[in-house]
């Protein structure tokens, strides 16, 4: 939902459709949580994604880079082991307020400069156009785009040599305009709903902090064994959105409690249908 002059407005057509499943006049309990996908978070991941992909770094992927840099910058929580020794583990970016996150991104850029030797201005220019009013996870497409997505039939037809939904880093693809997809017939729409519920159940079952590889394997199974060619582009886009939100939980960037109802909303089902 989006707050406009004291009223809650559905953020997307999917949200409006979900809201319409409740009858008029029904009373509901609502818990407010601010959207965690802030602009500086997107800048953080955009810079790390490009640095790991294009430069020589000691990290295998952007998630590993993020954890290492947070440790290096002291963006950590302190705890104690059973033996009483102090230990530090990286904070989630969601734990930082806006000024802290802005400072963290600036310090992270300095670290990237020292690791890669690429001028600081290059990294700043790479993300200067990312704004709050843009859709999340829209950055420059990578050369292996499509890998961690459920591909559309058109994508497969365009490149028959590529494996269905070959790997792509989350956040490095541009979501196609789903409005361009013709309205589905009622049987097709029902098939989409059933498929999305299955996708939500399978992906959520593989979601947990540190379980990103399990989630990735589950997505591969969905692509190869559970995705009929008749599934619409709109449903595939929703499935990719569900996968992206599950990834945030795996990387500790979002809580499971907040994410589960969002996934149910995207899939058009109840939380109990997923769990």
Image (cartoon, rainbow, N blue to C red):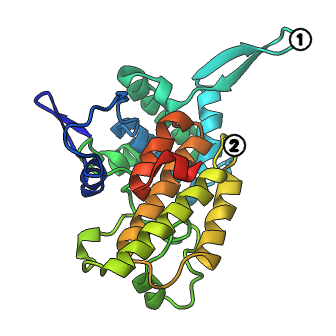
Crowding near pointer 2: few (<14 within 10 Å), some, many (20+)? few
Position of 224 relative to 96 (above/below):
below
Position of 93 relative to 215 (above/below):
above
**Residue 11 in sight in this render:** yes
- Please name the residue shown 69% across and 43% down the image: 210
Residue situated furthest right in the rendering:
83
Q: Nearer the viewer, residue 8 or 125?
A: 8
Q: Nearer the viewer, residue 43 or 135?
A: 135
Residue 128 coordinates in the image, percent (x, y) = 30, 45
Q: CA distance from mark 1 to mark 2?
A: 24 Å
Residue situated furthest top in the rendering:
84
Task: Residue 83: give its label.
Answer: 1
Label 2 secondary element: loop
- Please name the residue shown 56% across and 80% down the image: 164
Label 1 secondary element: loop
Q: For residue 69, what is the image quadrant?
A: top right
Task: Residue 210: give its label.
Answer: 2
Task: Residue 22: give its label.
Answer: none
Residue 57 coordinates in the image, percent (x, y) = 64, 49
């Amino acid at each position: 939902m989006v707050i406009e002059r004291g009223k809650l407005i559905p953020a997307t057509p999917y949200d409006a459709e979900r809201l319409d499943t409740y009858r008029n006049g029904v009373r509901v309990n609502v818990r407010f949580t601010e959207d965690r996908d802030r602009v500086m978070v997107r800048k953080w991941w955009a810079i790390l994604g490009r640095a790991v992909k294009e430069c020589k770094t000691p990290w295998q992927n952007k998630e590993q880079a993020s954890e290492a840099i947070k440790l290096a910058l002291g963006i950590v929580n302190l705890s104690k082991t059973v033996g009483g020794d102090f230990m530090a583990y990286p904070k989630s970016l969601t734990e930082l307020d806006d000024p802290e996150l802005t400072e963290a991104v600036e310090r992270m850029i300095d670290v990237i400069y020292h690791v890669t030797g690429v001028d600081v201005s290059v990294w700043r220019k790479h993300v200067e156009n990312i704004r709050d009013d843009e859709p999340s996870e829209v950055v420059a497409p990578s050369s292996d785009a499509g890998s961690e997505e459920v591909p559309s039939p058109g994508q497969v037809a365009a490149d028959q040599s590529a494996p269905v939904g070959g790997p792509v880093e989350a956040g490095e693809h541009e979501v196609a305009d789903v409005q361009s997809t013709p309205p589905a017939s009622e049987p097709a729409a029902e098939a989409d709903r059933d498929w999305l519920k299955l996708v939500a159940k399978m992906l959520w079952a593989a979601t947990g902090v540190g379980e990103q590889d399990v989630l990735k394997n589950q997505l591969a199974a969905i692509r190869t064994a559970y995705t009929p060619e008749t599934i619409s582009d709109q449903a595939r886009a929703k499935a990719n959105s569900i996968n992206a939100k599950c990834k945030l939980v795996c990387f500790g960037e979002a809580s499971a409690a907040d994410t589960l109802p969002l996934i149910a909303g995207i899939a058009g089902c109840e939380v109990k249908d997923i769990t």
